[in-house]
Each structure stands twice: as C-alpha cells, then as structure tokens.
Amino acid sequence: MKYIVRLTGKRVEGRHLAALTGVPPRSKPCRVFGAESRFSAIACAGRTFKNRQGAMTDQDILSEKQGAAGVLTLNRPQALNAINNGMTRAMAAVLDAWEKDPDVKTVILRAAGDKAFCAGGDIKRLYEHGKAGAHDLQMTFYREEYTLNRRMKLYPKPIVALVDGIVMGGGAGLAMHCSHRVAGDTYTFAMPETAIGLFPDVSATYFLSRLPGNAGTYLALTANRADTADAVAIGLVDAHVPSSKFVELTQRLVAGEAPEAAIAALKADPASASKMMEYANFIKLCFAPETVDAILGEIDEAGYAGMDFATETYDAITKNSPTCLAIALRQMQIGQQLELDEVIKLEYRMMSRMMKNADFYEGVRAVLVDKDRQPKWKPSEIEAVKLADIEPFFAPLPDGDLDFGA
C-alpha cells in the first residue's frame, strides 16, 4: 500500500425522565428546547437553557450533573437519535466543561427512547449537501464528528456508554470511543456503510481491525448486525447488563461507585448464544484472503457444502458497493498497524473523496431516497475493482490532513 498514512420544542414528562435517571419526577414536566441542527451552544447565543433542576438542554442533547456523575443523553428518539452537527458541538462543549469540574468523576452517555442508542449520522442531509455542491458542509460534519470521537477516546475521566437498541455507524463511533461500553438486552450493532456506498468510518479502521478472528472484516463487508451475545463474545462491549438494571447502574455511578465495580455488580450473561461464535471458524478462515473476490470464493465453497450461513453471508456481501468493499477490506488489512490519530486522518482523507464518488449518491438514493433498494454500482462487478483503483482514496489531501487543533 502506497499510502498508510429539529427538534421543535417538546415535553418530556417527569415519569419518562425518572425512567432514564432514577430521579423521582417533579410535579410538573420540564420543557426541552430544540433548535435547527446547524446551531449549537457555541455558535448561537441564546440557544442554551437550564431547567429547574439545573440541567442544560441544547438542541437534541441533554446534560445534567447528578452526584458524582455527568449525564449526557442523546435526545432525538424520533430520528433514532441520529447525530448531527449541533449534537457533536454540544457534546464537545459539555465534555470540555466537565473535564475541569472536580465534582464530575464519571460521564454517563445514554439515549432517550427504546429503539436506538444512535442509528448513525444524518446521511440524507449529507447527500443533500453533496447534491447542492456543498462539499464544505459535508466535511465540516465529518471533521467535527471525528474530532469528538478522538476527544472521547482520550478523555481523562471514565465515560460509560449505556447502549441499548440500534447502534450503527456514527452511533458506533460514539459508543466505541467510550472507556466502558455496556450492552443492554436489545443491543444491535452494525456498520452498514458498504450497503449505501460508503466505507466503515468513525475509526472503524482502528476498532474493527482489532476484533478477533476476522470478525471485523466480516462486519465491514457484510454490513450484518451483531447482537448482545455477539458483542460480548468479540469485544465490542465490556459487559452485558440487563436493560432493567440500567437505572440501578446509573444510580451506582451517581453515588460515586467506580465504573468497573458498578458494572461487575450488575453484569449478566446474554440471554442467547452468539451466532458469530457458532460460525467463528468459518468467519476466521473465509475472511482471511487478501481480496474480496477470493473471500467470496471461500464463502461460495462453504455454501456449496450446504452451509446456509455461508449462502446468507455471500448474498449480503454481493449486494454492496464493489468499490466500498475493496476499500473496507483494505482498511481491515492496514488498521492494526495504525495508531488512532493516523486512522482518523486517513478516514478523513477517504471520506473527502467518497463524498464526491458516484456510489455514495446512488447508494443513498436506493436506500433512503427512492427506497427501491436497487443500487446501480459503478463498477458493478467486484472483480473489476483493483488495488490501484482504491489507492487514491487513501492519498494525502492536497490542502493537508485533518488538524485536530483547528
């Protein structure tokens, strides 16, 4: 390899807040204020409010100090808590403040609603920006998202992610950069980017490539989901805590208990066995070859031998963008040799090119706009994509790499 290097205002009833926090409800509901996604506490004066308990609300992020903990809540359940510019800016501002606050010993990251922790970034908005020629707005989103991810990974205080429901794409970026990751009963992880003409980003080059037995390569190429049992088995999370115990875990952290001890006291075995572990040998062997075409050949042989899982895996891969599959495989091959900062800069280069690539717009059109789920990839054949075709995605940017100090 040559280059390695809107929320409109809405009411949150006291009983719902109590379910999230374990704090008894007030007699009156608090009002959560929202703003257009392009605004933030930093960029727009007058858009930050405090409720009667002293909790800051800004856009789709709630933040509140409770005892020894700072609690951050992704509060966009109507959009599966998909992350936007305003949310990344608000989170960064709160983390900056809490780093200097001696009262905050641990940060808790959680999500409102019961369907999703975070379903990713606002991909449709990025598609619209690209169609309008606003490449700078696209890259502003990625620059701020990647910088936040790095900030979380390097944060000097523990960040405990309480993850239940869907955690995909940018949501995985939030969770995977936390020091402690806890999966609830309905945890559902995926990096579905290759299915929409993208590559696994938010440092997936780093964290997927380090999963055992080629599990990361399997997840990157298939865009398949991993459940709680899979996540515990392959190391996507540190532990499973039943969803019904999340309130108690929060209370323990608020009371000042160390995250390791609090999690250990409540963790439990997942309710079901891991399907990925059932087929671990298949995944390890079939995802070892150096090209996507060769990987498919290994999987095809297993399918002919009568393994239904192999047939399902083959079909999952061949639906995705051939160009993005080749890029994702290359990420997995080089990722273990790269440090986090190298990965983030590399993915920023790649995303800058991908935002101008036809497969991204075709994939989003097919999945999110027209929803016909019949993308016309260019090229359409996996064997047509060569290493030389994807090398330019990894090349340094003419105007320089991502600067974390900017």
Image (spheres, grey):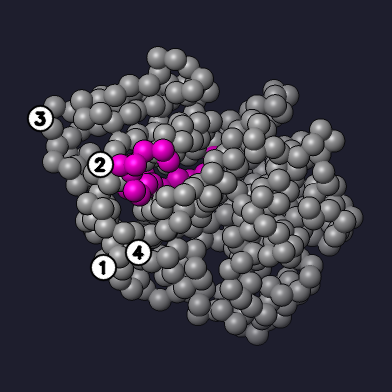
Q: Is residue 63 above or below residue 278?
A: above
Q: Residues within 10 Å of mark 2 (few under 14, many from 20)?
A: many
Earlier sequence position, callout 2 versus callout 4: 2
Residue type, mark 4 in image = Glu
The residue that appears at 68% across and 65% down in the rendered structure is 336
Task: Look at the image and tell me whether residue 108 can be seen.
Answer: no
Task: Look at the image and tell me whether residue 255 can be seen.
Answer: yes
Q: Please report contact status of discs 4 and 1: CB closer than 8 Å, yes or no.
A: no
| Callout 1 secondary element | helix
The answer for how far apart the CA atoms under marks 2 and 4 are is 19 Å
Residue indicated by mark 4: 260
The answer for how far apart the CA atoms under marks 2 and 1 are is 21 Å
Q: Which mark is residue 27?
A: 3
Earlier sequence position, callout 3 versus callout 4: 3
Earlier sequence position, callout 2 versus callout 3: 3
Q: Residues within 10 Å of mark 3 (few under 14, many from 20)?
A: few
Residue type, mark 2 in image = Gln
Q: Which mark is residue 66?
A: 2
Q: Please report contact status of discs 3 and 4: CB closer than 8 Å, yes or no.
A: no
Q: Please report contact status of discs 2 and 1: CB closer than 8 Å, yes or no.
A: no
